Amino acid sequence: MLRSCSYCNGIHSTTYQCPKKPSRKKFKTSEADKFRNKSIWRKKSWEIRKRDRGLCLICLRNLYDTQKQYTYENIEVHHIVSLQEDLSKGLDNYNLITVCAYHHKRCESDGDVPRKIQLEIAKEQEELNKF
């Protein structure tokens, strides 16, 4: 049986593999991507959001071009020391803070929000919630 080929606009048998057909690209998942898909990370993420009361901690402190002090929309959990640098700190409470999408980009960029400040904020939050 013959068919019209959508890759070369020719006519081939249904069993013929057209050489112009693009190969499927396989996505390589990194260890960090695999980590983010685990249920233990999702639980930790919700735990950190609950600890930080669902607010951006940088906006709450009016740091680094805060638009609105009580930002609770588009909140993300940020790894201060990234998973690519040290996967073992992925679930460490002192390495995680909640930030809005705007500040998350600034935290990820080179020194826009210094890592030292981020670590101090995480430590402060953890100390507040020990009691």
Image (cartoon, rainbow, N blue to C red):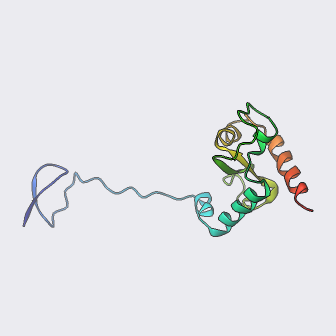
- Give the x, y percent position of residue 91: 74, 62
**Residue occupying the point 77% across, 54% down:** 53
Q: To which quarter of the image does residue 94 belong?
A: bottom right
Query: Which one is in front, 123 or 68?
Result: 68
Q: Which quadrant would the C terminus be assigned to in this image?
A: bottom right
List the single residue furthest toward the right: 131
Q: Which quadrant would the N terminus be assigned to in this image?
A: bottom left
**Residue occupying the point 10% across, 60% down:** 3
Establish if 73 lies above or below 48.
above
- Give the x, y percent position of residue 125: 85, 52
**Residue occupying the point 69% across, 47% down:** 72
Establish if 79 lies above or below 36.
above
Q: To which quarter of the image does residue 71 belong?
A: top right
Say whether residue 20 is left or right of residue 11: right
Query: Which one is in front, 66 or 96?
Result: 66
- Give the x, y percent position of residue 110: 70, 36
**Residue occupying the point 39% across, 55% down:** 25
List the single residue furthest toward the bottom: 39
Query: Which one is in front, 80 or 53?
Result: 53
Establish if 119 lies above or below 28.
above
